[in-house]
Amino acid sequence: MGELNMAINRSDIDLALYIDHALLHPAITEEDLKHGCTIASRYNFATVCVYPSAVRLAVEFLHNQKTKVGTVIGFPTGATTTATKLQEAEEAREFGVEELDVVINLGWLKAGKSEAIYQEIAAICNETGKTVKAIIETGLLTNTEKRLATEIVMDAGVAFVKTNTGWFGGATVEDVRLLHKITKGQIGIKASGGIKTLEQAISLIEAGATRLGTSHGPELLRQRDNLGAQQGENE
């Protein structure tokens, strides 16, 4: 715990600004969505991340709020066609979305079809003009494939590389460190999947993550506040 305290004090992290509040349960209702957006706005999270069918409502719920609306494209496998991904992305843009978390085609990556991945992601970046985060699903890749995928999406114009969907494993400090080494600060890194504790969150940020995708944002902030209270009592 001592190392964690030092990390927080040294970095002076405003944790809420890192959080993309995930509202991605398959059975989410309109009431659930409204509640999630209210929470995200209350805590000043960076975004809510919702399914494409929920974008219009999320934009309405967060009208004139600082928290932005993001959505997932080709989620969670990345195996839909380029035309389908483009349609999803363009419709989300029309509904007011600000950020797009796009799953790359992992089969193409495994087959060495780098140009196809590049063309698909570049088309989404260019045609929507929105902040694009490319999900490379690190849990299914070798380190060589992680490097290749990251280099492809960087060349295609993304603003972030994202570790995972959360469906096939979660973010690790080792993967974030690797992505940070590859990107050299040229684009952001979103760590996503399995982030449930303050210690995980701080460790990922210190490794190079500039966004955290999690549905546990409020709990992370409660853990931070409890830790701060304990520190105050000990002083």
Image (spheres, helix red, strand yellow):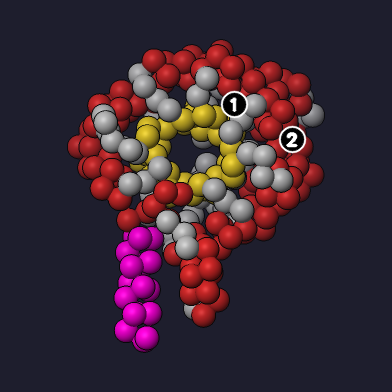
Q: Is residue 25 visible?
A: no
x and y, in percent, of residue 7 in the image: 53, 69
Which element is circle 2 on?
helix
Which element is circle 1 on?
loop
Who is closer to the viewer here, 110 or 200? Answer: 200
- For the point 79% across and 44% down, which residue is it? 144
Q: How much space separates mark 2 and mark 1, taking CA atoms?
A: 20 Å
Position of 109 with respect to 105 (left or right) is right
Going by the numbered disc 2, the residue's amino acid type is Glu
- For the point 52% across and 20% down, which residue is it? 129
Label disc, if present, on residue 151 of the rendered structure: 2
Task: Identify the mark nearer the N-term, 2 or 1.
Answer: 1
Q: Is residue 69 visible?
A: yes
Span of residues in magenta: 219-235
Residue farthest toward the left in the current orientation of the protein: 31
Going by the numbered disc 1, the residue's amino acid type is Ala
Whether residue 66 is situated above or below residue 123 in the rendered picture: below
- For the point 34% across and 26% down, which residue is it? 55
Position of 75 with respect to 115 (left or right) is left
- Taking the magenta stretch, the answer to whether it contains residue 15 is no
Position of 69 with respect to 206 (left or right) is left
Q: Which residue is mark 1?
A: 79
- For the point 47% across and 63% down, which residue is it? 12
Mark 2 vs mark 1, foreground winner is 2
x and y, in percent, of residue 224 in the image: 38, 66
